[in-house]
Image (spheres, rainbow, N blue to C red):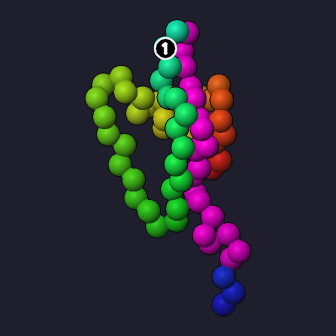
């Protein structure tokens, strides 16, 4: 069985992503990759950007800067 050429490609990639609301920056220059088979946990204090990160990952919010690839 032939392997897909995309097997090692990241499933999710953030490259210098920034998201803000009015005068408040929620994400500033976030960069990471999630590869196939990896499991990640997003944790942090209230108001630290967890929901903004997830909404940006699925396309509900657009970054002001950087690139998201899913």
**Which residue reaches farthest top?**
23
Question: Image height check: is 10 above or below 59?
Answer: below
Question: Image height check: is 32 above or below 43?
Answer: below
Apparent side of residue 35 relative to residue 65 in the rendered image (left or right):
left
Apparent side of residue 38 relative to residue 2 in the rendered image (left or right):
left
Residue at (69% x, 87% y) in the render: 2
Residue at (62% x, 72% y) in the render: 7
Q: Where in the figure is residue 46, as x and y percent of width and height?
A: 30, 25
Q: Where in the figure is residue 15, as x and y percent of width and height?
A: 61, 43
Q: Is residue 60 visible?
A: no
- The region drawn magenta spans 4-22
Apparent side of residue 65 relative to residue 37 in the rendered image (left or right):
right
Q: Where in the figure is residue 38, as x and y percent of width and height?
A: 44, 62
Q: Where in the figure is residue 52, as x and y percent of width and height?
A: 48, 29
- What kind of element bears circle 1? strand
Quarter of the figure with the N terminus: bottom right
Residue at (55% x, 20% y) in the render: 20
The residue pinned by badge 1 equals 24
Is 19 inside the magenta-drawn segment?
yes
Comparing 62 with 29, the one in front is 29
């Amino acid at each position: 069985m032939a392997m897909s050429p995309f097997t090692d490609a990241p499933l999710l990639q953030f490259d210098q992503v920034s998201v803000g609301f009015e005068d408040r920056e929620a994400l500033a220059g976030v960069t990471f990759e999630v590869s196939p088979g990896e499991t990640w946990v997003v944790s942090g204090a209230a108001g630290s950007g967890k929901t903004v990160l997830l909404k940006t990952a699925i396309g509900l919010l657009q970054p002001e800067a950087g690139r998201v690839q899913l």
